[in-house]
Amino acid sequence: MTNKIKSGQEVLNEFFNEISKIEVLDQEIAKVIVSLYREDKLTNTNLSNELTRIREEKIR
Amino acid sequence: MKIKNIEISSFRGIRYSLNLSLDSSKSVLIYGDNGSGKSSITDALEWFYDDKVEHLSKEEIGPKGINALRNIFLSDNEDAFVNLKFSNLRIDARKRLFYKSLKLSSEYLNSTQEFNNYISASQKENLILRYKDLLRFILFTKSERLEEISEIIGFSEVTKVKTVFKKAVNSLGKELKIRNFDSQINNKQTLIIEQVQQNINNDDQYFNAVRELITPLKLSVEVKNVESVDKVLQLIKKPEDEKAIRLQLSYEKVIETLGNLKDSLQNILSSYREYYKRYQKISKNVDKLKKISLEKLLSEGLGILEKDVFEDEKCPLCLQEKSRDELIKELKRRIEELAVFKKEKDEMEEGRGITQGFLQGILSQIEVALREECLLIKENLEKKNEIEQIKNLLSNALERLKKYTFIAPEEINKPEEFVYLDNSKVQQIVSILKESKGKITTDRKEDLKFSISNKLTLIRQSYMEIRSLKKELEVFKNQLYAMELIYDEFVKKQRDALSTFLKAISNDINEFYLYMNKSEEVDEIELIPLDKDDELVGVTIQFKFHGNVVSPPDKYLSESHLNCLGICLFLSSVKAFNKVNKFFVLDDVISSFDKAHRLRFANLLMEKFSDYQIFLFTHEKDWFEYVANMVKGRDWIVTKMILDYSKGASLEIPLTDFKKKIKNKLKMSETSEVGNMIRKYLERLLKEICFNLEVKMRFFYNDQNENRMSNELLSELRGELKKRKCEIKDDPILDRLSASLFIGSRTSHDSSFNESISDLKVFYDDVFELENLFTCDENECQGQISKQYYDPVKKLIRCKCGNKAYKWQE
C-alpha cells in the first residue's frame, strides 16, 4: 500500500492496469474486463454476456 | 489558482459596486459587524462557483436561493454580477444574473473550455466555510460521511464498478446452484453402474470398462480412445438393433429426468422455504412494506433527474418548484434510508429467483422427456399423461411464484402447500418405464452382440454427458473463482485507498486540533471506515478522550470544541482535496471560541496555511485586531466592511489605497474632499500608532471608542511618549500637527472651510512625516514600532525588523 492519496479515478485506473497481475487469474476474463472498462461498457449485462460467451467457447 | 481581483455589483447587500484588488493574490482580513455585508462577499463567491447559495436555497426563497441574490434596489433591466480575475488571466470571468423573459437567468462571460474545466474542478473543492456549516460533517450519519467523502474523492464510480463485480459473482454462484451439476452427474453414474457395476470417473476407467464389456466378442479393435469406442459400436451394431437401442436410450432419458425430479424438488422446496421466511418477515411490517414500495419510485425519479431528462427546477412528479440539486440530495437520502429494507427485499427476491431457476430447470428437462420416443408408444400414453400432470403441477407453482406480490400476502403458499408431489407415484412411473425398457432386452437375452451393443451405447452416452457436465462445471467454477478473486482484490484496493486517505486526513485533523487545544484530554482523532458484511457502510470519527477511545464526538465534546473539530476537518479537507484552487474563505467561524482558542486559530492559519490565499471575515473586534497586528508586513489586506443604509455594503478603503487617492488628488490639484480624506487618513494612522504603543485612552462604551478625534489621539500619544521618555517626544512634527488648523474638531470632517491646495499639501506632508516617524522604511518590514517588539534589556521599542527603534521606559 502506497501512502499517496488517490482519487476514485486513480484507484480504478490503477486496478485495471494491474488486473492481469492478480495471481492465478484467467487472463481471458481479465482481458474482457479491462476492455469493457476502457470502452466505458462495464455493466452487469455486458459482463454477464461476456462471461457466458467465454464459457460457451471453452465448453465447445 | 488564486484570486487577483473581486468585483461585485448589485448582489445581496452590495447595492453598487464593491471592488477588492488583491494585487499579487494577497490574503484578506475583513472586519464587519453582523449585517454589515461580509457574507455578501461569501455568497457572491459561492454563487460564482456553485451557481447557488446553499443557505438561501429554501422553499420560501426558491431554488438555489437565486431570488434572493440581486440587490433589492436593482431595476429589472440591470445586471447583478460577480467579476473575478485570477492568477491565470485566461480564466478571468464575469458571471451575471439578469432577467430574461421575466425569468432570472445567469451566465458566465467566459465560454472557453479551460474556464469550464476550471469551474467543474472547483465545484469539487472545499472553498468556503461558514459558521453554520461547522458541524455539518460531524453531525452527519456514518453513511452520510462515507457518501460525502466518496463524492469528493470520486469514489462513487469505484462503488459502481464494485457492484458490477459483486453481481457477477452472485449470478455465477446462483447459476451454479441451479444447474445442480453434481446431481446430474450422480444420476448418470447410477445408470453406468446399472450397466457395468462400477463407477466411471475418467477415460482410463471408461476404456477399461469398454474393453471388459466387449471381451466376449473377441474383436480385433484396440480400445484406446473415444474414437475407437465409436468404432467398436459401429462394428457390433446391427441395423435391426438400432430401433431397440434408440428406444432403450429414450427410456433412460425419461427415467433419468424422473430421477432428477427428486433432487430438484428438494432444492425447489428448500429455496422456497428461505424465500417464504423472508417474505413473511417483510410482509408483517406494514411500514417497511410501504417504504419498500416507494423505493422503486424514488430510484426511478433519481435516475430521471441524474440523466437530466427533466431539467426544470421542479419536482417532475408534482411539478412544485424545487431545486434540482436539493431534490437529488433528498432522494439519495431517502433511498439510503431504505437501503436496509431494500437489502432484505433483494435477498428475498434472490430466493425467489433461485426457486424459479430450479423450477425452470426441471421443467425444461421434463418438456424434453415428454418428446421422447418411448412416451409416444401407445402403451405408455398413460404414463405420459401422468408426467404431463407433474409438469403442470410445477408450471402452476412457477406461475404462482412469479405473481406473488405484497399486495396479497394471504395468497402466498406455505412451503408445504407450494408443490406437493407424491414421490411414490413418481417411483411407480419409473418402475413401469423400467419394466417396459427391460422387455426390450428380455426378448433378446441370448443375443450377446445386442446386449453388449446396448450396454455400450448407454455407458458411452452417459460417460460423454458426464465428461461434458464436468467440463462445464470446471469452466463455471473457474469463472466463479476468477470473479471472486477480482472482487476481493478490488475491495482490498478500495479499502486501502480509503484507509490511506482517511489516515492522511486524520493526521492533519489531529495535528490542527491539538494545535488549537493544547493540554486538553483529546488526542488521536481518526476517521475510521466501517464495514458490514464485507461492505463499506460508513465512516466514524473516533478519538481518545481522557485516555479512552470513544465515538462519536458530539457525545463527549462541548459545542466550542465540536466547532473547533469542524474547522480542523475543513482545513484538512482543503489540504487533501483542493488541487486547483489555492484559496479558501472562512466566514465568521470563530464565534464560539474563547480567547485562547481564537489566538491559537489565528496562529495556526499563519503557520500552516501561509502558502494559501485566505479570505478571513469576522465580526469579533478583538480577534480582528489580533490578526490585523499579526499579518502586518505579510501579504495581507486588512480592511473593514461599512454598511450605509442608502449606499449598501462597501469596503473601507485600505490605508495604502487611501494614500494613493490623496496623492492623486493633490497632484491633480483637486481640492474637493481631499481635506477630509487627509483628516480621515490621519485619524486612522493615529489609531494604529496608539494601538501599537498601547496608549491609554479615556474609556467609552462600544462604538464611541471608534469615534476618537485626531486631536485627542495625538494629545494622548504625546503624553505617552513623554511618560516613556521616548526620544521623539518633542519631535517638531508633533507640535506642528497639534497646532494645525486642519486637524480641527470632529465637525471638521464636514467643514466648508475653504482650503487651498497648497495648504492641503503642507498638511499632507506633515501627516506623511508623522507616519515616517513611527514606520520602518525598510522594504521588507514597513511596519510600525510596537509594544509587541519591546526590548526590555535595551529598553527600546522597535518595529518588527528592529531597524526603527526608540528609547522606551517601561
Image (spheres, rainbow, N blue to C red):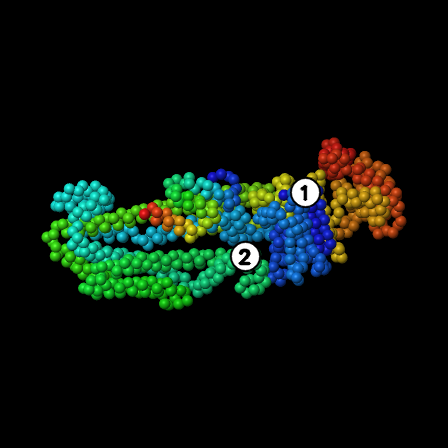
Residue tagged 2: B308
Q: Which of B422 and B217 is in front in this view?
A: B217
Q: Residue drawn 13% across and 44% down? A: B218
Q: In this view, does B761 lie to the left or right of B426?
A: right
> Which secondary structure lies at badge 1?
loop
Q: Residue at x 32, y 46 (%)?
A: B474
Tell me the chain of label 2: B
The residue that label 1 is drawn on is: B25
| Residue shown at the point (62%, 48%) measured from the top left | B112
Q: Quadrant of residue B327?
A: bottom right
Task: Name which of mark 2 and mark 1 comes first in the sequence.
Answer: 1
- B541 left or right of B701 in image: left
Observer-nearest residue: B292 or B103? B103
Q: In which quarter of the image is the C terminus of chain B?
A: top right
Q: Which residue lies furthest to the left in this view?
A: B446
User: Is any part of residue B2 visible from this angle?
Assistant: no
Image side of residue B120 versus residue A37, left or right: right
